[in-house]
């Protein structure tokens, strides 16, 4: 089983918004990223529209011919928009409106009733659900109780520790992935994954279905070009 690469294009919108026009075009990048081999497009429309706007979400829907993954904190407006757009997947992320970026996974035990209700709403609409989760094996059981299809391993801690001690960096993620498989949950991963750390991560996490990567990938594309960068990521994920 090869892990799918979903390219997060938030940072294209960041650059576009810097001048208020349509350069670079978020929609054209989505088309081209898929042409270059991306197996999904991920966006994270935040309430302040710092990068991806609501308009982007609707504009992108007909253009994503691979898999469309919309991430966000399930505020009522977010839920309404996702139900209207109907992406292949929605990823629930518990970040505060003013957070500089996503910075934690869900406490599924504390928020069990809320998450169960939201997961059910999306699944009844035919949208696959994924819950952003810290690498904590004990949280997997609570994630499973929500009825979610998948978890997304929040990989910032791995990315930070990997250069110093790869085995220590992967340990909790491996154990969480094993537990997720035991509970029948699909496994996604994302946040701060890069060309440097991705192969080690994907080689050591069993049953990894999808990685969503944006910040590093778009930054690396400034030097290598988008097509070369996407191809380099796909090579890291290939299981020869
Ligand atoms: C959930 C996650 O870790 C990232 O997908 C997040 O979307 C990054 O958001 P920013 O691009 O706003 O940093
Ligand atoms: N879910 C993670 C994602 O979509 C991209 O995170 P990052 O690569 O921008 O840190």
Image: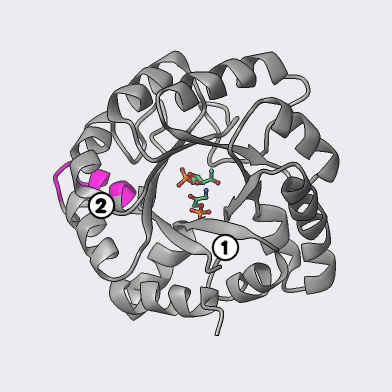
Where does the N terminus fall, quadrant-wise? bottom right
Give the Cα distance between marks 2 and 1: 24 Å
Q: Earlier in the sequence, mark 2 or mark 1?
A: 2
On whether residue 185 falls in the magenta region, the answer is no
- Quarter-wise, where is residue 138 in the image? top right
Which label is found at residue 65? 2
Left-right relation of 210 to 39:
right
Q: Toward the viewer: 79 or 238?
A: 238
Dot label at residue 27? none
- Spot occupied by residue 102 in the image (x, y as percentages of width and height): 57, 40
Badge 2: few (under 14), some or many (20 or more) residues near its Cα, within 10 Å?
Answer: some
Asked if labels 1 and 2 touch by Cβ distance under 8 angstroms, the answer is no
The quadrant of the rendering that contains the C terminus is bottom right
Tell me residue 167's x, y (percent). Answer: 82, 71
The 10 Å Cα crowd at callout 1, few under 14, some 14 to 19, many 20 or more, is many
Considering only vertical position in the picture, is 24 above or below 86?
Answer: below
Count the marks.
Answer: 2
The span picked out in magenta is 13-22
Helix, strand or loop under label 2: loop
> Residue shown at 48%/32% (left/top)?
72
Mark toward the viewer: 2 or 1: 2
The x and y percentages for residue 90 are: 46, 35
Residue 225 visible in the current orientation? no
Mark 1, secondary structure of its residue: loop
- Residue 111 locus on image (x, y percent): 70, 19
> Which residue is painted at 83% across and 45% down in the image?
137
* In the image, the residue with mark 1 has its CB under 8 Å from the nearest atom of ligand 2: yes
The image quadrant of residue 56 is top left
Q: Which residue is identified by label 1?
A: 193
């Amino acid at each position: 089983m090869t892990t799918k690469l979903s390219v997060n294009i938030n940072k294209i919108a960041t650059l576009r918004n810097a001048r208020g026009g349509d350069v670079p075009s978020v929609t054209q990048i989505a088309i081209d990223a898929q042409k270059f081999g991306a197996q999904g497009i991920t966006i994270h429309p935040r309430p302040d529209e710092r990068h991806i706007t609501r308009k982007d979400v609707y504009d992108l829907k007909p253009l994503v011919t691979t898999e469309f993954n919309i991430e966000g904190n399930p505020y009522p407006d977010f839920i309404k928009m996702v139900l209207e757009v109907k992406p292949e997947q929605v990823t629930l992320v518990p970040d505060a409106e003013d957070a500089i970026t996503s910075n934690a996974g869900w406490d599924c035990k504390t928020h069990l009733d809320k998450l169960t209700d939201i997961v059910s709403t999306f699944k009844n609409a035919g949208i696959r659900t994924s819950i952003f989760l810290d690498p904590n094996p004990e949280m997997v059981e609570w994630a499973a109780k929500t009825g979610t299809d998948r978890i997304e391993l929040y990989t910032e801690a791995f990315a930070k520790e990997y250069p110093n001690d790869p085995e220590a960096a992967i340990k909790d993620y491996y154990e969480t992935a094993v537990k997720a498989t035991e509970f029948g949950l699909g496994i996604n991963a994302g946040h701060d994954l890069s060309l440097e750390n991705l192969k080690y991560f994907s080689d050591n996490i069993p049953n990894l279905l999808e990685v969503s990567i944006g910040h590093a990938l778009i930054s690396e594309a400034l030097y290598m070009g988008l097509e070369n960068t996407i191809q380099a990521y796909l090579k890291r994920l290939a299981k020869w």
